[in-house]
């Protein structure tokens, strides 16, 4: 259900790392809990983001939730498609619905994140 090569947070965000860059989004579990995503607000290109601090928000028909950044770094790219067509987050949260691309500040932060198996056990509770 959740991609095995991603790392996950208890705040229901994920990061997929390639070299020094992390692609960030919310989990399939989170988008299902939120319901229909209506609006996405994100940090801007060039902004510094900090692990476990908000790097944006997602508004749905049920609630507005902060997107808690899984890693620290500098925003390299923002997914304009997700901002212009928020339903993309519901349709493909682990693919086209990604939110931010970040240059990692400290790869050791990844050690504090969960594997897909750990995350699936966490959400099953």
Image: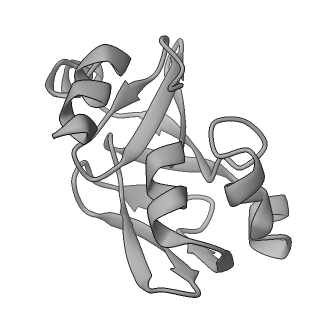
Q: Tell whether 102 sits left or right of 123.
A: right
Q: In the rendered view, tell whether residue 41 sits above or below residue 124.
A: below
What is the x, y in percent for residue 13?
A: 40, 46
Residue 47 in view here: no
Residue farthest along the front direction in this orientation: 124
Residue at the (71%, 50%) spot, across then down = 97
Q: Nearer the viewer, residue 1 or 94?
A: 1
Instruction: Find residue 81 and report its image quarter.
Output: bottom right
Q: Nearer the viewer, residue 52 or 124?
A: 124
Residue at the (69%, 58%) spot, across then down = 90
Q: In the rendered view, tell whether residue 103 sits above or below residue 51.
A: above
Q: Tell whether 26 sits left or right of 76.
A: left
Instruction: Find residue 8 and report its image quarter.
Output: top left
Q: Tell whether 4 sits left or right of 99.
A: left
Q: In the rendered view, tell whether residue 68 sits above or below residue 107.
A: below
User: How was the colour assigned to the protein in this rendering?
Assistant: one colour
Q: Tell whether 53 sits left or right of 22.
A: left
Q: Quadrant of the C terminus?
A: top left
Residue at the (75%, 70%) spot, across then down = 86
What is the x, y in percent for residue 45?
A: 63, 60
Residue 8 in view here: yes
Q: In the rendered view, tell whether residue 124 sits above or below residue 91.
A: above
Q: Nearer the viewer, residue 118 or 111?
A: 118
Instruction: Report the label total.
Output: 0
What is the x, y in percent for residue 52?
A: 21, 53
What is the x, y in percent for residue 63?
A: 44, 86
């Amino acid at each position: 259900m959740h991609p095995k090569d991603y790392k996950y947070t208890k705040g229901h965000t994920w990061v997929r790392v390639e070299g020094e860059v992390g692609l960030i989004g919310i989990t399939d579990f989170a988008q299902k809990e939120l319901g229909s995503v209506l609006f996405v607000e994100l940090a801007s290109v060039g902004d510094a983001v900090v692990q476990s601090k908000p790097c944006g928000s997602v508004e749905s028909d049920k609630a507005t939730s902060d997107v808690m950044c899984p890693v620290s770094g500098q925003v390299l790219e923002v997914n304009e498609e997700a901002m212009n067509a928020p339903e993309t987050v519901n349709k493909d949260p682990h693919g086209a619905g990604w939110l931010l691309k970040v240059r990692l500040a400290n790869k050791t932060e990844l050690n504090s994140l969960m594997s897909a198996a750990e995350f699936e056990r966490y959400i099953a509770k």
